[in-house]
Amino acid sequence: MALLPKISASLNNKCNKISLTEETGPYVECTNETGWGNGNIDTAQIAYADVQFYNLEQTPGILASGSGEISGTTFTDTTHFTGSFAIGQTLIGTGIAPGTVITNVVTGTGSNDGGTYEINIPQVIPAGTTIYGTVLTSNYIMYDGTTDVYSGVVSAPTPGSFLAISEASWSNPDGIYQLVYNIIDTDGNSYTNEKQHVLFICNLCNCKDNLVVKLVEACDMIATKKLKEQVDQMEMFIYGIKTAFACGDFDTADAIITAATTFCETILGCIGCGCGKNC
């Protein structure tokens, strides 16, 4: 047997907050043999866990790794392991603040012992910490010794489904994201969810809702007709996106998202319709 982590994600109606629900569930013979406990690990054996989001064009995985430290806005790769650290990579590891990104190479080649790098979030990470560089869009820590979403929930260390992270900041646009739920146990074994994509079109749905409000309030026949056509167009966009995504045609879904976003921003005269804006 082996643990198969399961997770789901949703946005709030302003599109700027994300919630994550842990859905692995306890081990149950014949129905959930990949869950927590029995021959698999339970949540008390987790050494590190996070949920990572990648854009379609990004390939999930570690691009660089080393043993080092962070002091303020300086990351020092004391002992380099693999790959090459570079500007734009997100750093992950025990205690590292989510969203930590390399903004400048100060010294070194990216793959040498002692290389130093400027990062965007001041923090203190002790020497000897294993630090990874990746190209993820966002990540949310589930467990790192300081953050722990598992121990306080009902039935831990073999909990059922529970809300793990509620209303964390989300600043990415509408699109399709690959979601990677990564768990490392105290023996160094790694467990990852099955390949999973999520579709976020919260802004486009808000755009359509804004148009519906304008349609209801309109009292001019010409304006009403135009608004009705715009609402119909947005509904067609949204239907096309959901259909393409359901069929696994991500390129088509992504293309329609781009077209729909341009349409929304043009007719409502604002950038990023949704996200709490009164367009």
Image (cartoon, helix red, strand yellow):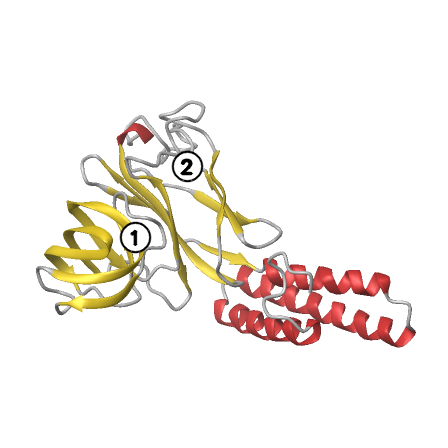
| Disc marking residue 24 | 2
CB under 8 Å between callouts 1 and 2? no
The picture quadrant where one finds residue 76 is: bottom left
Callout 2 amino acid: Thr
Furthest toward the top, the residue is 155
Assign the N terminus to one quadrant of the image: top left
Q: What is the C-alpha distance between the residues marked 1 and 2?
A: 34 Å
The picture quadrant where one finds residue 245 is: bottom right
Secondary structure under badge 2?
Answer: loop
Name the spot of residue 223 as percent of width and height, x first.
Answer: 85, 74
Query: With 101 as the anchor, is 176 left or right in this view?
Result: right
Query: With 266 as the anchor, is 110 left or right in this view?
Result: left
Residue at position x 55%, y 59% from top?
Answer: 246
Name the spot of residue 168 as percent of width and height, x first.
Answer: 48, 46
Q: Which residue is mark 1?
A: 122
Q: Is residue 63 visible?
A: no
**Label 2: how many Cα within 10 Å (few below 14, some 14–19, many 20+):** many
